[in-house]
Amino acid sequence: MTDIALDVWLYGNLARFAGEAAHAGYANPQVRLPAGSTVADLLAALGMPTEERGITFINGSLSAMPGLQPDLEQALEDGTRVAFFHLQSMWPFQYRLGARMTEELHQAMDSREVGQLHHAYRNQD
């Protein structure tokens, strides 16, 4: 079976899951997994519980956020870039006007009983 190489970025206190590759505030471990591996497999390889991650980007597309993680079964390919942000991280500045998201996250957001999530709310009074 062929391995795939992943470009993984861990931000904030998630850097501790990179072991010796950890720096202050971030880590960029180069992870190799068997072909056909998923985000769940990557989390297991890192020893990171999925509940510890905040927002997640796969190749620049938002794939998960706290309490909404439909990306666990998403297959990863050779060269995929995955960025895990810790729960207290601020929304990255470059995405302040919206972010491209994976189809899985888009469908999960549309299917929520309360409807889509919004970044601004009106007072109902």
Image (spheres, grey):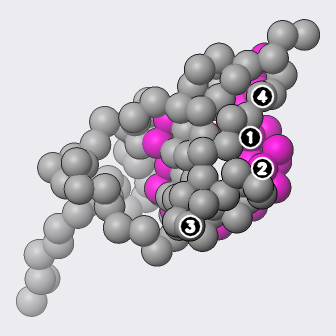
The circle drawn on residue 32 is 4
Q: Give the foreground label among 4 and 1.
A: 4
Q: What stretch of residues is rendered in magenta?
A: 35-58
Residue 67, located in which quarter of the rendered image? bottom right
Residue at image mark 2: 46
Residue 69's disc is none
On the image, numbered disc 1 is attached to which residue?
A: 42
Q: Return the disc, 3 or 1, that comes first in the chain's sequence.
A: 3
Q: Earlier in the sequence, mark 4 or mark 1?
A: 4
Q: Are marks 1 and 2 in contact (CB under 8 Å)?
A: yes
Labels 3 & 1 near each other (Cβ < 8 A): no
Label 1: few (<14), some or many (≥20) within 10 Å?
A: some
Assess whether mark 2 and mark 4 are in contact (beta carbons under 8 angstroms). no
What residue is drawn where x is 59% and y is 33%?
A: 7
Front of the two marks 2 and 3: 3
Expressed as whole percent of the image width and height from the top left, the position of residue 85 reads: 50, 58
Spatial separation of the CA atoms under disc 2 and disc 3? 18 Å
In this picture, residue 109 sits left or right of residue 81: left
Q: Earlier in the sequence, mark 2 or mark 3?
A: 3
Q: Nearer the viewer, residue 110 or 13?
A: 13
> In the drawing, does residue 106 fall left or right of residue 33?
left
Q: Amino acid at mark 1?
A: Leu
Amino acid type, callout 3: Ala
Cα gap from disc 3 to disc 1, whole angstroms: 22 Å
Q: Which residue is tagged 3?
A: 24
- Alpha carbon of mark 1 to alpha carbon of mark 2: how far? 6 Å
Mark 3 or mark 4: whose residue is earlier in sequence: 3
Say whether residue 42 is visible. yes
Q: Position of residue 110 (x, y in %)?
A: 38, 45
Q: In what element is the residue under mark 3?
A: loop
Q: Determine the secondary structure under disc 2.
A: helix
Q: Position of residue 59 (x, y in %)?
A: 46, 30
